[in-house]
Structures are given as C-alpha cells and as structure tokens.
Image (tube, rainbow, N blue to C red):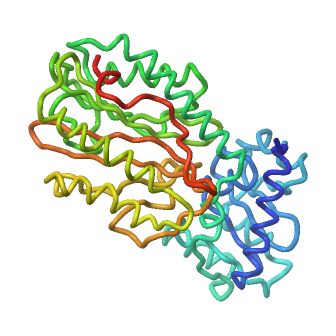
Amino acid sequence: MKSTKSVHAGRLSRLKALVAKAGVDRLLVTSPRDVGYLTGFLGGDSYLLVGPAKPVVVSDFRYREELEPVEEAGLASVVIRRGAMSEAIADLLASDRAAKVGIQSEHLTVAQRAGFAKAVGANRIVDTAGIVAGQRLIKDDEEIRLISHAAKIQEAAIKAVLPTIEPGQTELEIAAALEAQMKSRGSSEPGFQSIVAAGANGSLPHYRPGKARTLRGRSLLIDWGAVYQGYHSDMTRVFALGKWPPKIREIYEIVLEAQQMSAAALAPGKTTAAVDAVAREHIAAHGYGEQFGHGLGHGLGLDGHEEPRLSHMTSSTVLQPGMVVTVEPGIYLPGIGGVRIEDDYVITPQGARNLCTLPKDLAWATL
C-alpha cells in the first residue's frame, strides 16, 4: 500500500498538469472535500492554491496544528491568515500580477466570487468547473479501501441493531441506535440523516425519521451510511416485522430483480444511462414505471453523492474502472410503503465488484 504522502503527492502532481491544460496559471481550490482529497486535510475552512510552484494551503489559527503534517510531508506550504481569505489570496498572488487564476465556479457563491475579483482583480479571475471533480471520478486503491471499510462499519452496525428491533419502537429510536453503533465502530458521522421509515412512510424516498412506530406485519425501510476517514458508504434494505404485507412482498421481488440485473450490467464502456435503463425497463414492464422516479444511483467518495450519476435525468457518462457507484432502484406506493435496495459497486476492468456483503433475500429481511 502506498503511503499517504505519496498518494496525495501523486494527486497534486496530476492536478498541476490539469491546471496547465485548463489554460490558467493557478487554480484556487475552495471545496473542502477537494482540499481534503489533495492534501489529506479534512478540517474545512481552508483554501488550496495550486500552480507551477509548491501548493499553498491558506487557513486560520484553528487549524494551524492540524495542518502541520501537510507541511511536514512537503505536500504544501501553510499560510495562517490574519485577515479575510480574499486578502490572503491576493497577497500570495501579488508577486505575479499577470497570473490568471482559475476558481471553482461550481463551489463559490456569487458573493465570494465578487470578493475575490475585487481583491485579486476581475481581469485575472477565470471561471473553471470540474477540474478536481473529474480527477476524483476515478478512485485509487486507497480510496476504494476506505469506502470498503466504511461499508464494513455500516454492515456491522445494522447487524447489531436488527436483533433489537421490535414492534412499538419509534423510527427515531432505531435511527439513534444505528448511528451510535456506527460511531462506536469508527464512523466519524452518519453519511447523511439516516432514513428509518416505518410502514407507509417508506413511500417517501428521502423520508426523515420521526415518532412513527414500527408495527408487526408492516415494512421498515432503512437507508443509512457511514463515513470513515472522510469516505462514504451507502446502503438500503427493507424489512418486515413478521409477515410481509402482500403488496410490499410483490414489489420487493421486482426491485430485487431490477437491482441485480442493473448491477450485473455495470462494466467499463457502458453508459450510466444504459445501466439506469436496465432497472427502469424491468420495473416498468411490471407496471410500476411511474413509481420509480429517481435515478438508479450516484457516485460515492468524499461526498455521499457525487459523479457519476446513474440516471435518466442527467447527461450520460461512460463508466471506467475505478468509479464507485450505488445501485438503488425503488418502487414507492403512497399509503402502502416503499421498497429500495441499495449496494455500492466499484467498476473493474471485467465488470463490477460489490463492496457490500449484506444479504437481500426475503427470508433474511424478515425480522
């Protein structure tokens, strides 16, 4: 396994080449996730200036000690600002007033952009988009290891919680237990607000848990994620407390087939739209096309939702080895409930490998 230093040094080296190709002299990296990807520092509120010379992290007193390893590893110099961020960046660029500075237009607000333009000079600012995001599309071995570890954490957590679930518990109680189990196993935080949807609440794809209680003979949808050293995992399972409601059992089998078929279609050279269509057409053929309205999946990494998107609603992307995506088809029936089944996959030269190991059969999902 490569050292953390060499991993991040390689990423910075590749970014320098991309910056030169983009036609700018410097790139100001303002996304906290991108700064973390390039340096290993995930504290936030810090910008990274990348160009021909040594990169510079601009931060403040709160992170001075935390940034020492970045400087000691020789990845970047660290400047602790004492004024506004825009003024600190302007000072760094003062010696080269002809330099064109690319900014991450997909991240900066209009007000932040205006502030930098005023401090640095509007004629020097160049809007760029997707330079680091494009680099992050392909995960290296270290990133896949971290995502896999996050998946192991969340699987161990759900296994610990499932035996404790019984009729009468609230959604919030189950969510709290699940998140505590993930943290006790090394997850720094939930990947997102855990979705625990009892009964009919499962028809809401991004439901937020509340005081509704589990009931015997009803379904329970759980969508949860862990974060390990900044990297996310994301899974969804649906359970029944005792006997399965007939309609939920019917759509469960359809969704499971769609999930397995579309996962099997993952391969280099396939487009994200084509893989999405595999699940969408299967669900539509069973009469539930209108009840599957979201995309099939999304990328995973330092963000819980990132590129590429397996969707019929966005521009298509050609899959490449190293991409990590979720596959999560669903059917949602208002007043009855919903089924979504989700695993995480890394694209390999031969196809795809599932980073998750939890079962998905009805027998296992019966509590």
User: Left or right: 331 with respect to 148?
Assistant: left
Image quarter of the C terminus: top left
| Residue ranking furthest to the left | 335
Q: Quadrant of residue 174?
A: top left
Residue 42 coordinates in the image, percent (x, y): 67, 45
Residue 34 coordinates in the image, percent (x, y): 64, 57
Residue 90 coordinates in the image, percent (x, y): 74, 72
| 249 lies above or below 163 | below
Q: Quadrant of residue 114?
A: bottom right
User: Left or right: 44 with respect to 270?
Assistant: right
Q: Nearer the viewer, residue 193 or 196?
A: 196
Q: Residue at x 28, y 44 (%)?
A: 255
Q: Nearer the viewer, residue 100 or 318?
A: 318
Q: Nearer the viewer, residue 156 or 12?
A: 156
Image quarter of the N terminus: top right
Q: Nearer the viewer, residue 264 or 124?
A: 264
Residue 249 coordinates in the image, percent (x, y): 19, 32
- Number of callouts: 0
Q: Residue at x 22, y 43 (%)?
A: 204
Q: Residue at x 69, y 59 (%)?
A: 47
| 224 lies above or below 80 | above
